[in-house]
Image (cartoon, rainbow, N blue to C red):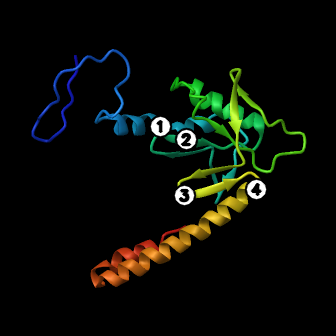
């Protein structure tokens, strides 16, 4: 039986049976997920893989909430990243129903059907992720450039809002403006 302390006043949840994993919606899920994925980028880069370099940094994976986007420069690199991410130390299970594949600038001989452990993965022409649309016809550097433009536009909107609120927000607005995009 387990209990979770959820306040500084030492209040605990009712005892519950926990054999393996935790139930969905549980108060500790975000924290445990963050701890699990904290070192995943370094782990993925322990093996030399063909992954893109964006703004001088090697970027094998994008993580947000409970989603992950694995980025490989070749089909082989993408498969190796997938195996290392899901079948490595963290022993995750692949949900093929929620998985998609997109190849940027596919070569003429590229086979559209992707298989992971014998299961067919849907190949798509674009993926929307965190408000950014990644399209299969563009090179990765085009996506980085396009994303930086969107971020600069968003920063201008936030600055305009903050300066309209009053002088008390100018310090925060100035810090946001000089932040590297």
Give the side of residue 84 with respect to residue 102, left or right.
left
Q: Residue furthest left?
A: 9
Q: Is residue 143 above or below residue 11?
A: below
Q: Nearer the viewer, mark 1 or mark 2?
A: 2
- Distance in Å between CA atoms under marks 1 and 2: 10 Å
Q: Which residue is mark 1?
A: 37
Q: Nearer the viewer, mark 4 or mark 3?
A: 3
Q: Earlier in the sequence, mark 3 or mark 1?
A: 1
Image location (x, y in percent) of residue 91: 52, 23
Asked if the residue under mark 4 is in contact with the one under mark 2, i.e. CB atoms within 8 Å, the reply is: no
Asked if the residue under mark 4 is in contact with the one under mark 1, i.e. CB atoms within 8 Å, the reply is: no
Asked if the residue under mark 3 is in contact with the one under mark 4, i.e. CB atoms within 8 Å, the reply is: no
Asked if the residue under mark 2 is in contact with the one under mark 1, i.e. CB atoms within 8 Å, the reply is: yes
Q: Earlier in the sequence, mark 2 or mark 3?
A: 2
Q: Which residue is mark 3?
A: 131
Q: Which residue is mark 4?
A: 139
Residue at 74 percent of width and 51 percent of height: 136
């Amino acid at each position: 039986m387990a209990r979770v302390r959820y306040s500084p006043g030492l209040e605990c949840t009712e005892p519950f049976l926990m054999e393996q994993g935790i139930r969905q919606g549980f108060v500790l899920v975000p924290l445990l997920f963050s701890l699990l994925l904290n070192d995943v980028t370094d782990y993925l880069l322990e093996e030399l893989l063909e992954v893109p370099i964006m703004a001088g940094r090697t970027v094998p994976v994008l993580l947000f909430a409970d989603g992950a986007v694995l980025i490989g420069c070749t089909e082989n690199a993408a498969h190796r990243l997938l195996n290392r991410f899901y079948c490595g130390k963290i022993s995750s299970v692949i949900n093929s129903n929620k998985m998609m594949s997109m190849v940027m600038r596919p070569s003429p001989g590229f086979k559209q059907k992707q298989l992971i452990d014998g299961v067919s993965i849907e190949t798509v022409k674009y993926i929307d992720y965190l408000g950014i649309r990644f399209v299969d016809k563009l090179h990765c550097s085009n996506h980085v450039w396009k994303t930086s433009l969107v971020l600069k536009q968003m920063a201008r909107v936030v600055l305009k809002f903050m300066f309209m609120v009053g002088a008390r927000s100018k310090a925060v607005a100035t810090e946001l403006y000089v932040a590297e995009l």
